[in-house]
Amino acid sequence: MKMRVLMFGWEFPPHITGGLGTACFGLTKGLSKHDVDMLFVVPKAYGDEDQQAVRIVNASEKTFDLKDEEYKEFWKRVKYME
């Protein structure tokens, strides 16, 4: 089964203000070499991010209804590691 990773950060190249974006870019490139499916959520995506190794999601364009049945079913299926 292919591993799927959900990552959150406040920046992703080429839009960086510090080291987090650079580190996240390196992580996504490294994980992609191991056939990991990645979704990276940022507060604002500009559309020119390198998405060869990761799919970028613009959080500012997403809305969630916590009472929605689909949302409740999603959390029943989520597995995570600490």
Image (cartoon, rainbow, N blue to C red):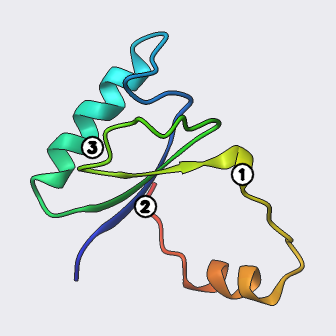
Three-letter code for the amino acid on which mark 2 is drawn: Met
Q: Within 10 Å of the Cα at label 1, are there few (<14), some (14-19), or many (20+) other Cα atoms?
A: few
> What is the number of the mark on residue 79?
none
Element type where label 2 sits in the image:
loop
What's the amino acid at mark 1? Glu
Q: Which mark is residue 28?
A: 3
- Nearer the viewer's eye, disc 3 or disc 2? 3
Residue type at mark 3 is Thr
Residue located at (20% from left, 50% from top): 31
Q: Which residue lies at the image location 48% right of the left edge and 74% below the top edge? A: 79
Look at mark 2 in the image and give the residue it sits on. Answer: 81
- Compared to 32, does 47 lie above or below? above
Of tags 2 and 1, the one toward the viewer is 1
**23 or 56, which is in the foreground?**
56
Q: Nearer the viewer, mark 3 or mark 1?
A: 1
Taking 10 as reference, is 82 left or right? left
**Image quadrant where residue 62 sits:** bottom right
Q: CA distance from mark 3 to mark 2?
A: 18 Å
Residue 4 location, quadrant: bottom left
- C-alpha separation, residue under disc 2 versus residue under disc 1: 28 Å
**Number of labelled discs?**
3
The picture places residue 3, in percent across and down from the top left corner, at 27, 70
Relative to 9, 43 lies left or right: right
Residue 21: percent from left, percent from top: 40, 24
Location of mark 1 (residue):
61
Q: Residue furthest left?
A: 33
Left or right of 69, for residue 30: left
Question: Mark 2: few, some, or many residues within 10 Å (few <14, many ≥20)?
Answer: few
Q: Callout 1: helix, strand or loop?
A: helix
For marks 3 and 1, give the CA distance. Answer: 22 Å
